[in-house]
Amino acid sequence: MRNTGFEIRSSEIEALNKKFNSLSQKVNKAAGDGLNKVGMKILADAQGNLKKNNSIATGKLINSGKVVDARGSFDVEVGFDTDYAYFVEFGRKAGTRPPWKPIFEWVKKKHIVSTLNINTKRPSSKQQDYETRAKSLAFAIAKSIERKGTKARPFLYPAFRKNEDEVIKILQDAINRVV
């Protein structure tokens, strides 16, 4: 009787494993490069949404945007690194008072407070007077937000949704190019 079969040599398995590892590394690199590009596009679109929503006061939020690329994996993180980015994106429910200091910076940046002396109606030369008025206004705005809340002005999520199909396309293209 004749034996039917085949022989597997360990050297052939090692060579096959090396080819698979090389292929996997190439796919990861191609996908990582593509995802980083999409991350930059999402960031640019989110910054454009901030401008379109008129959500720029001090420039702190729009300038805090960044893309963190974790090489060797399929992770690319797009985000904004400020205390209030979440509240701009999703709004703020009534009932919680926001910190007044960021509002104070916004009031100063926008020059909302009058520099006229209340009694004489002439320009005030005292910077202290301006600071006191700006703090009072910031505190009043914080109290108003506590009572009424703020409405959401989404900027990051719409940018992600706009580029979602491109992420899938990049992963498919990376695999097709390497294979």
Image: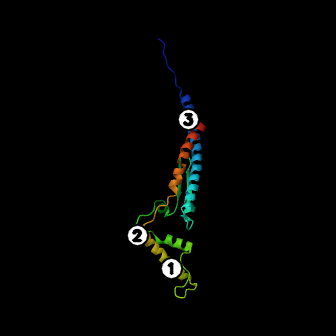
Give coordinates of residue 115: x percent, y percent: 56, 81
Q: Which residue is mark 2?
A: 147
Tag 1: Cα neighbours inside 10 Å, few (<14), some, or many (≥20)? some
Q: Nearer the viewer, residue 36 or 3?
A: 36
8 horizontally vs 92: left or right:
right
Mark 2 lies on a secondary structure that is helix
Give coordinates of residue 92: x percent, y percent: 44, 64
N-term mark: 1 or 2: 1
Residue 20: image tag = 3
What amino acid type is highlighted by mark number 3? Phe
Answer yes or no: do the residues labelled 1 and 2 have beta carbons within 8 Å? Answer: no
N-term mark: 3 or 1: 3
For the residues labelled 2 and 3, the Cα–Cα distance comes to 60 Å
Residue 56 appears in view: yes
For the residues labelled 3 and 1, the Cα–Cα distance comes to 68 Å
Q: Nearer the viewer, mark 1 or mark 2?
A: 2
Residue 15: image tag = none
From this viewpoint, which residue is outermost toward the bottom?
Answer: 120
Tag 2: Cα neighbours inside 10 Å, few (<14), some, or many (≥20)? some
Q: Taking 11 as reference, is 58 above or below it?
A: below
Q: Which residue is mark 1?
A: 133
Mark 3 lies on a secondary structure that is helix
Q: Nearer the viewer, mark 3 or mark 1?
A: 1
Tag 3: Cα neighbours inside 10 Å, few (<14), some, or many (≥20)? few
How many callouts does the rendering have? 3
Q: Nearer the viewer, mark 2 or mark 3?
A: 2
From this viewpoint, which residue is outermost toward the left?
Answer: 95
Q: Taking 96 as reference, is 19 above or below it?
A: above
Mark 1 lies on a secondary structure that is helix
> Which quadrant of the figure contains the C terminus?
top right
What amino acid type is highlighted by mark number 2? Arg
Q: Nearer the viewer, residue 128 or 91?
A: 91
